[in-house]
Amino acid sequence: MKRKILLTFLVTSFMLVAVVTIPLHFQDKEHGYQPNHHGEM
């Protein structure tokens, strides 16, 4: 059971990282650096 919890935690953290970083990369390409206002949940 512990392995399943660990796997779920890893997948969740990976998804969070992807959700946070992908929009940042798109913003950098579109118009330089901007503080992320709508990034917070």
Image (cartoon, rainbow, N blue to C red):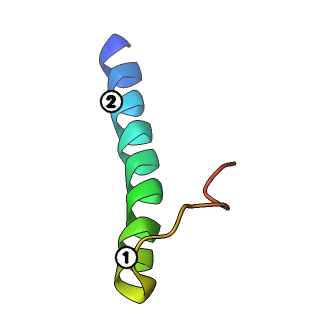
| 25 versus 20 height, above or below | below
How many tags in the picture? 2
Closer to the eye: label 1 or 2: 1
Who's the residue at 44% across and 39% down the image? 12
Q: Callout 1: helix, strand or loop?
A: helix
Q: Which residue is mark 2?
A: 7
| 10 versus 28 height, above or below | above
Q: Could you tell whether 34 is left or right of 10 in the image?
A: right
Which amino acid type is marked by label 1?
Answer: Asp
Q: Position of residue 15 (x, y in %)?
A: 42, 49
What is the spatial separation of the Cα atoms under label 1 and label 2, in whole angstroms?
Answer: 31 Å
Who's the residue at 67% across and 61% down the image? 38
| 14 versus 3 height, above or below | below
Which amino acid type is marked by label 2?
Answer: Leu
Who's the residue at 46% across and 46% down the image? 16
Who's the residue at 60% across and 57% down the image? 39
Q: Earlier in the sequence, mark 1 or mark 2?
A: 2
Q: Callout 2: helix, strand or loop?
A: helix
In this view of the protein, which residue sits in the foreground, 19 or 32?
32
Q: Position of residue 21 (x, y in %)?
A: 38, 59
Residue at far top of view: 2
**Which quarter of the picture shows residue 11?**
top left
Q: Which residue is mark 1?
A: 28
Question: For mark 1, does the 10 Å Cα neighbourhood hold few (<14), some (14 to 19), or many (20 or more) residues?
Answer: few
